[in-house]
Image (cartoon, rainbow, N blue to C red):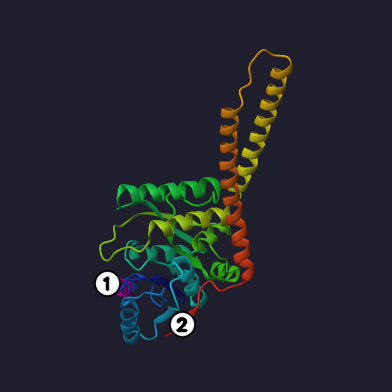
Amino acid sequence: MAKISIIIPCYYNEQNIPLTIPALLENELNFSQGTEFEYVMVDDGSKDNTLMELLKFKDAYSEKFKIIKLAGNVGPHNAVLAGMKYATGDCNVILAADLQNPVELIPKMFDYWSKGIKFVIANRQDREESGIQKLLANTYHFLIKKFALHNIPDGGFDFVLFDKQLKDEVVAMDEKNTNTLYLMSWLNYDFVSIPFVRKKREIGKSRWTLKKKLKLFIDSFVAFSFFPIRMISVIGLLLGLTAFCYGGFIIFSKFFGNIPVTGWTTMMVVILFVSAFQMIALGVIGEYVWRALDASRKRPNYVVDRIW
């Protein structure tokens, strides 16, 4: 007999909850007999009726549901981390509340876990979304795979099943400003990847704004890659070599050549170019330093207001 915890971060999902939870309850019939279910629903500071909708199902299925209300909005990855801390299953699933990820894949993922695979990924082979959304998502995952985490599947993922051992390791890390799901890939456990097509969101409006996507992109790079810092070092070295060669050319022309050396325009172009690079470099270094400071403060990633 095994227990599976399904962790669902919820943010302005009052319209989705009445459809998502019945779909999950119906999906239980596709599991082997004796499987226990725990639904860990995390209200990530929603200001609509998300919590009320969750409590309705808590009242109806008290033994299966655990409702965690966070004091404020901390983002989906920290909400997932909160759910992981309070989940008690032998294996765990991270699932979005809007049914864009097919719940019917969970039994297949569970079967792989039952055979000893501790990490099962449902990766997005394609998505029923607009061209610009596809472009942004594909660019993000391509860059992360290229320069940070080489072992993630093409298309990325946010729908996974993982063993309790992985959950405990990620919760113990308690990292800030990171991609919680990609931390599991960083652990380097062997995994099975199941491709699927992500559905278009049919109900409600996504709160996953461009600003939040950009923050996740920066967080992911800083958390898993030293490429930006290494790039600064390489560009700085190339600029230094260029400056040395150009300086030698000016000295040679001054004393031995007949080539006139003009000054103001060239000097201004060089100053502006180098100054721009220095500001960009300071910004990149500042991102790393700020995250080190944030981690040293030991402030919690989330504050739990109440648990039902």
- Is 257 located above or below residue 216 in the figure? above
Tell me how many marks there are.
2
Q: Which mark is residue 114?
A: none
In terms of depth relative to the viewer, which is nearer, 47 or 135? Answer: 47
Residue 275, image quadrant: top right
In the visual, does 68 lie left or right of 50? right
**Magenta span includes 187:** no
Q: Which residue is mark 2?
A: 305
* Magenta segment: 17-26
Q: Main secondary structure of the magenta part?
A: helix
Residue 304 in percent (x, y) is at 48, 80
Residue 227 in percent (x, y) is at 59, 47
Residue 294 in percent (x, y) is at 59, 66
- Is 209 located above or below residue 67 in the figure? above
Furthest residue to the front?
A: 264
Rate crowding at label 1 as few (under 14), some (14 to 19) or many (20 or more) other CA atoms within 10 Å.
some
Q: Residue at x 37, y 74 (%)?
A: 46
- Is 69 located above or below residue 189 in the figure? below
Q: Residue at x 31, y 79 (%)?
A: 53
- Mark closer to the chain start, 1 or 2: 1
Q: Amino acid at mark 1?
A: Gln
Q: Which residue is mark 1?
A: 15
